[in-house]
Each structure stands twice: as C-alpha cells, then as structure tokens.
Amino acid sequence: MKKLTLEKILQSQGFGTKKSCRYRVLDGLVEVGGEVVDDVLAEFDPTDLAFAVDGEPWQYREHVYLALNKPTGVECSRRPAVHRGVLSLLPDQFTARDVQPVGRLDHDTTGLLLLSDDGNFIHAQSHPKRHVPKTYAATTAEAVTSQLVARLTVGVKLIDEPEPLAATARQIDTHRVEITIDMGKYHQVRRMLAAAGHNCVALQRTAIGVLTLEALGLAEGEWCYLDAAQIALLKAD
Ligand code: URA
C-alpha cells in the first residue's frame, strides 16, 4: 500500500481532523513499533500497521467489521430519540469513521449486531434479496407448545404482509422458542409470535448466518473485531 504520513493514517482511522492528528504526532503522543514518532513527514506503509495513540494500541484497518452483543435499552438508530445510541458503546473513533449497524434490532432486543464502515458490506448484508438467516431466542409469556412451533413453521399472516411469513422454529424450553427468519420485516419475530397467540417478553439474536453469539463469546455490551475468516463466511452466506 502507498506510504502515508502518520497524520493521514490517524485521520483515516477516526482520530479527528488532519490538524488535530498532526498535533498528536508533534506532541509525541503517537508510537510506531514501540517508539515515539514526532516527525510529521515520516511515512509508513499503513497495511496492518501497529501503532499507539496516547498509549493505546491500534492497528490500521482500511475498514472495520465489528460484532456487538447489544444490551437492552439501546437504539440502533444513528440519531437515537429515546434510548442511548448503539454507537455510544464503541470507541469514538468508530463514530468518526462512520461505522453503522448492519440492519437494526429493537431497543429491547439483545444479542448479535454487526457494524461496519464498509458501505458495500452493509448494503450486501442487509439487502432483502440476500436472505441472510438470522436466529433469535424468544421468551414468551405463555408456555411454548408444539402448536406454536407448527404455526410459525407453516407461516402466520401479518396485517401488512400480502403472504404469510414462515420461520424455522424449535422449542428450547417451557417458555423459549428458537426462530430463524431470512427476512427483516419490521418487528418481525415479535409480530409473528403475536399472530400465533404468544407475547414475546424478551428477544435475543443468537446468530447471523453461521456466526453465532456463543462462538464469539461476547458478554452483553461487549464488542470485537471480526477476523478475515468470519468476514469471508458472512460474505459467502
Ligand atoms: N424481530 C423483532 O421483532 N425485533 C427485532 O429486534 C428483531 C427481529
């Protein structure tokens, strides 16, 4: 990759304006390979470059691909209206580089949420024609029955949908059902459950394609970078 000055590298990674990045370099706050570099003219190949800002280690990434275990009471909107926004759970650098959620979860849904600043990835993952399967564990007020599982599997009619919507469903325990859908209609899981006569009292997204929350091992509110293999799996799904 073409060599760049540190201020350009820092700016591309969300550390602020070119001028403020220059001052960080001049103030001796930036290290490369464990050494302070305060030469604003020094150039580095950014590919996988490991650097530190204010003692915090970073790695150059052309794009970021993140997984978050979203807690409840958090809005996925970029302009949250009632609850705190999901971007507030991530370092400020990600907001500066325009990281956005891939699709949305309701404010009271927990679980796996992908975020990225790669517009092509966001578009491809959220495009309705991709039919990326998404799996949820829904807790219901009423006991889960085999009839509920059958109704979800056969399909339930929602008021604003021309055709019944079906899911892959299986009972987890007395009050929890696992539901996999490959569309992302508004409040789809809660509305499908309601149409089948069950009130959803808690909803957790446990998987997107082959990527599972369990394998990622994220506690609620925690996030991680996705590695190249995980990104490739999502793109192939
Ligand atoms: N379906 C819902 O009802 N809510 C979500 O957050 C996701 C899927």
Image (spheres, rainbow, N blue to C red):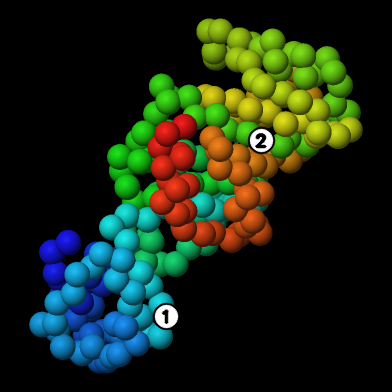
| 223, above or below 10, in the image | above
Amino acid type, label 2: Tyr
Inspect this view and state whether residue 19 appears.
Answer: no
Position in image of residue 218 (x %, y %): 62, 57
Disc ID at residue 136: 2
| 181, above or below 3, in the image | above
Q: Nearer the viewer, residue 86 or 45?
A: 45
- Residue most toward the top? 162
Quadrant of res 108: top right
Q: Residue at x 45, y 54 (%)?
A: 227
Please give left or right for residue 208 compared with residue 24 in the image. Answer: right
Q: Which residue is mark 1?
A: 56
Where, quadrant-wise, is the N terminus in this rendering? Answer: bottom left
Note whether ligand 1 is within 8 Å of mark 2: yes
Position in image of residue 47 (x %, y %): 25, 64
Circle 2: element type: strand
Q: Residue at x 77, y 14 (%)?
A: 150
> Which one is earlier in the sequence, the residue at label 1 or at label 2?
1
Position in image of residue 85 (x %, y %): 50, 55
Inspect this view and state whether residue 31 appears.
Answer: yes
Please give left or right for residue 94 compared with residue 147 in the image. Answer: left
- Residue most toward the front? 229
